[in-house]
Amino acid sequence: MIRLFHVSDVHFGAEDPDAIAWFTGLVATERPDAVIMTGDLTMRATTQEFQRGGDWLRSLNVPVTLEVGNHDIPYYWDPIRRLLAPYTRYAAVEKMIEHPLDLPGITVVPLKTTARAQWRWNWSKGRVSSGSLRRALALIDQAPKGDVILVAAHHPLIEGGTRGTARTRHGDIALNALAEAGAHAVLSGHVHDPFDVPVERSGRTVRMIGAGTLSKRTRATPAAFNELRIQNGQIEAIARTHTSAPPKPIEEAVAAGEA
């Protein structure tokens, strides 16, 4: 069995130190095979926040792959940097961004859903470009036959029933294409609440699995991350919350208000 910790939206600069210490302790004692971080490592994409976030990820001492979230790009009040040089502050985490993971029977495919500019007011929402989707589909095509395919993005491709929204442009088109190509699940963050929604696309069922947040910016649920247990081609997603409650499957935890 492969065990993965899926974490998102830590927001260094607005992080919850207790939740981070809790997660760090669990990684140290349980030793997952890898950590998948689906974006918003930082709050305002400052050099210091990236340094702190990178130091934390390296301190986990397990393989890590990192996606870029909308908070990891400079804000609107720094338009020149945002539009012309949005990635210059990434040095502390550059080697972890979309880093391939060596996991037997599992392929993790990155899908960029952030955009430095969009034809709408709220640039924090998701967008899947044709180029990003094409790269993801090519990686799926190269995956070993029989692998479980996990697509890692920041924004949910379609809404997962949470209070927060992604409103990802071209997300439904991307979900159809990923399903047809053989993806088994799309991991995401952004909305700060966990969810696990099976979606029928192209004659297949694709899981949309969202992680909570380890920041102080919680919404309907406490600080949380997901544990993914993968065995014999099956994915079990468990909400791990920063409470005394025992871990539960995500849908049960959400219904009980514990995740």
Image: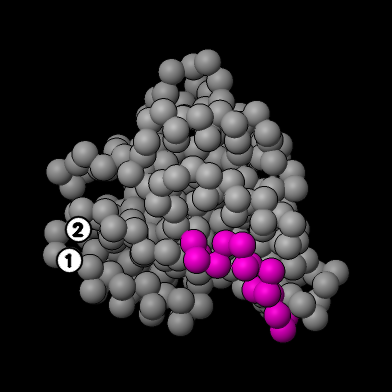
| Label 1–label 2 contact, CB within 8 A | yes
State the SS at label 1. loop
Residue 31 picture quarter: top left
Instruction: Determine whether, in the image, residue 255 is placed left or right of residue 85.
Output: left
User: Where residue 181 appears, x then y in whole percent?
Assistant: 26, 69
Q: Is residue 249 above or below residue 42?
A: above
Q: Which residues are magenta?
A: 83-97
90 magenta-colored:
yes
Q: Is residue 49 above or below residue 18?
A: below
Tell me which residue sits at (31%, 40%) in the image: 3
Residue found at the far top of this picture: 244
Tell me which residue sits at (34%, 58%) in the image: 101
Which amino acid type corresponds to the residue marked 2 in the rendered image? Asp
Which amino acid type corresponds to the residue marked 1 in the rendered image? Pro
Assign the N terminus to one quadrant of the image: top left
92 magenta-colored:
yes
The number of numbered discs placed on residues in the rendered structure image is 2
C-alpha gap between disc 1 and disc 2: 6 Å
The residue that mark 2 highlights is 147
The residue that mark 1 highlights is 144
State the SS at label 2. loop
User: Where residue 111 appears, x then y in whole percent?
Assistant: 45, 67
- Is residue 122 visible to us here? no
Tell me which residue sits at (49%, 43%) in the image: 60
User: Where residue 150 appears, x then y in whole percent?
Assistant: 33, 56
The chief SS type of the magenta part is: loop
